[in-house]
Structures are given as C-alpha cells and as structure tokens.
Image: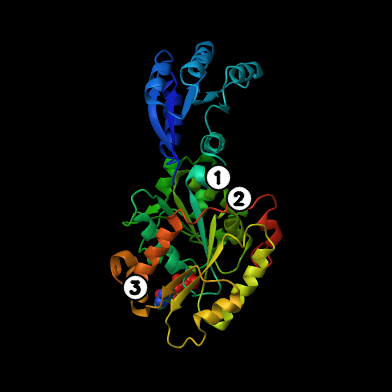
Amino acid sequence: MKNVLRLAIVDPDDASRESTKSILLGMDVVWLEAECSRYDFFSDVVAQTHPDISLVALDGDPDRALQLVSELQLTSPDCAILVTSSSNDGNLILRAMRAGVKEFLTNPVQLNDLMAALDRIGDQRFGGGDQGNRGCSVIAIAGATGGVGSTSLAVNLGCALAENEQHSVVLMDLDMCLGDADVFLDTIPEYTLVDVAQNIARLDITLLKRSLTKHSSGLFLLPRPVQLDDVASVTPEDLTRVIGLMKASFSHVLLDLSKSYSPLDMAAIEQADHVLLITQLDLPSLRNVVRLMMSFGEIEGLKEKTRVIVNRTGLQDSQISMKKAEETIGTEFYHRLPNDYRVMIEVRNNGVPLIEQAPKAAITHAVRELASKLSGAELEAVGETGGSSIVSKLGGMFGGRK
Ligand SMILES: Nc1ncnc2c1ncn2[C@@H]1O[C@H](COP(=O)(O)OP(=O)(O)O)[C@@H](O)[C@H]1O
Ligand SMILES: [Mg+2]
C-alpha cells in the first residue's frame, strides 16, 4: 500500500543536517535509515543499509562530496542521489549532474521542493501515480444538503481510520462559517486554519503538527476560523498549500466541506483523491445529487472519483426505496449508513466518537466498513484531475464565496 522511501543523509554541518532531518522526520513517506557527519564513511553505510535515496550535502567540501557521489554510483547503483547546496553556481550544478545526481536542492531545504523531488524519485522507483508513491489519500466529504450527516461521517470515519496504527489521519473543517467538527470531538483548539494558512511559509511539519489538536482516538483536527471576519482571509491557493503540507505527513487527509460549493470547497475537491457525496433518501437531497453529479461531470475526472453514500437508511418515514433512489441518481450507492438517531445524538452531544460511544452499534460497524473499503486496495486512486483548474471553472457556480 504505502511506499516509504528509505533515505540516508550525509552532511558535515550539524546545524544544516539537523534542519534537513527535522523536515524528513516529520514526513511519514520517508524513513531516515542512516545519518553521517563525514563523507569518508558514507559509501560503506549506504552499501550496508541499502537506502532508496542518498542525500548528500555539498557545502562541507564540494570536491570531496562530488567524489563521494561518483563512488556511490559504482558501489550502490540502485540508490538515487539527491544533493543539497546553498550555492547557485551553475558550474557546481553541472558537475553534480555529470556525477550522476538525480536531484539538486537549494539549502536550506524547503519542504515543497523536497516533496517534489521525492515524488519524482518515487515515480521512478515505484512506477507512476502520485497516490501510490506518496501513500496519502485525500478524502473530501461533501453533502447533498445541510444536515445530511457529512460532519458526523467525517469525524467518525477519521476516528475509525486512525484506529489502524499504520495510519496517520487529519481532519480539516472547511465549513468556514458554521463548522462544528471541534464540537463532535469535544476539543477547544488553540489554532485554526487561518493561523496555519497565514504562517504556511514558516511552517515545517513539526510545527504544523503542533498547530493541530490531537484527539485521544489519534485523529488530528484543524478547525475552521473562530471569527467570521477571518473567513475571507483564506484563499483557495492558501488552502491548496495547506493540503499539500498535510499530504506530506499524513496517510489520510479528510476534508469536511461546507454545503455552499464555494471556491474553497471546489479547491478541496480538486485536491481530493476521493469525494464522498452524502445524501439521504428524500427527494430534495436526491435531486441535488443529480444536479451536483451533472456539474461534476463537466470537470475532468471529478465524477469518476465521486462516490455517493446514503445516510440514515431504514428511516421509517422515508417513502423512497433504495432501488428507486439509485435509479434516480443513475448510480449505485457506494456505501450505506443506517439510521440511529439515539446513538448519533449521544455522539454529538457528548463529543465522543462512535468507536468509543457505541463500539457495537450497526452504524459504527458501517463506518468501520467504509474505513476499510477506503484504505483497501480495491479503491485505486483516480489521481490528479489534470490541467484545468476546477476552482476557476466552477467558482461561484453554486453561488459560493468569491
Ligand atoms: N446515521 C444517522 N442516524 C441518525 N442521525 C444522524 C445520522 N447521521 C447524522 N445524524 C444526525 O443528523 C444531524 C446532522 O448531522 P451533521 O453531521 O451535522 O450534518 P452536516 O454536517 O451534513 O450538516 C445531527 O444531529 C446528527 O446527529
Ligand atoms: Mg457539517
């Protein structure tokens, strides 16, 4: 499932080695296999530990470092080489490339540059596809109308995914005005999406994780802004960058959307590998599913990555059968969640997730089943939607915030 890249680093400068290491240690797509402060022993270390990548800092002694790169080509030809330097000297870059270097990063190493370099190396190592290499699944939870159960699902799915100790899961509350994911988790977060978005340039993954609230289930939460005034300060570009940072350190990024299909919601949908569209078996919701799917159909790849989930099945006053509903929306429901009014009210009012509050309830079972379906191999990522921006195409289509 997850392809972790094993990496060995050599850098004689303690400060720059520590700074690169702190970025690497926060990324669960990288395993730091070995570290060295001297060029002399590094090729032996690599020969013994067989990392996928050697990261060689050139600045300590560029000539010796490039000689080491040539040695590594001979002794460990399968190991990709990435070098870092604070120099922009074209001659040095050329020499590095000639010595067989795959990637050249400028010191101090920036997270985004490192991620992009690792992506390219991962692509060569494990074959194409962003998802497979990075091992991160971005799941947007959208709803066909207000109160349909999106937040209930987002929070409880997040907790169910976090039960697996191989997962690291974050939930971002993108219902910017009325979001209530923090209430479901009974937390009073210190920082919100606004703080993270405003400081994005200064954040590394360690700081990012410190800005999040960790629930006892293991789920991390990034809540919506506290002040309504702050809502407009987060742009779709900011959000895309925050999601990018999250992708670097979590195996699952859950996005609880608002129901306005605003440019921010659409930016989130664009970033998502899977979109879960929640509906209930009533006519207004089903009609909205049809409308939404029609609009989604205009954007390359979006309809294909959208799964419709029906919530509150078995509600007595529902007059529309499952079969009729599926005929109406023209697709099968990907998953069904039973109605359980009492348990769901308890879950919300007590701020305790389903897996704790009602571990044996049918609704909990259904949420866990969805979690394993989503993390299972059967759900291949659709990947990037490519080229055109959804935000620009659909921005405001549903009257969302500009
Ligand atoms: N499967 C379910 N059975 C019964 N009640 C549910 C179910 N899912 C959600 N609810 C209830 O529906 C209400 C709205 O849920 P919420 O998750 O806040 O919706 P949304 O985020 O789509 O607005 C809440 O009171 C919640 O307890
Ligand atoms: Mg909600």
Res. 130 mark: 1
Residue for point 53% across, 24% down: 83
Cα gap from disc 1 to disc 3, whole angstroms: 35 Å
Q: Is residue 102 above or below residue 205?
A: above
Whichever of callouts 1 and 3 sits on the residue coming sooner in the sequence is: 1
Res. 362 mark: 3
**Element class at badge 2:** loop
The amino acid on which the numbered mark 2 sits, given as a three-letter code, is: Glu
**Element class at badge 3:** helix
- Look at the numbered discs 3 and 2 and tell me whether their residues touch, using CB distance below 8 Å: no
Q: At which x and y percent is residue 160?
A: 37, 60
Q: At which x and y percent is residue 54?
A: 47, 25
- Look at the numbered discs 2 and 1 and tell me whether their residues touch, using CB distance below 8 Å: yes
Residue hosting label 2: 384
The amino acid on which the numbered mark 1 sits, given as a three-letter code, is: Asp
The amino acid on which the numbered mark 3 sits, given as a three-letter code, is: Ala
**Element class at badge 1:** helix
Q: At which x and y percent is residue 353?
A: 34, 65
Q: At which x and y percent is residue 134?
A: 50, 43
Q: Name the quarter showing ligand 1.
A: bottom left
Residue for point 41% across, 60% down: 371
Residue for point 39% across, 57% down: 161
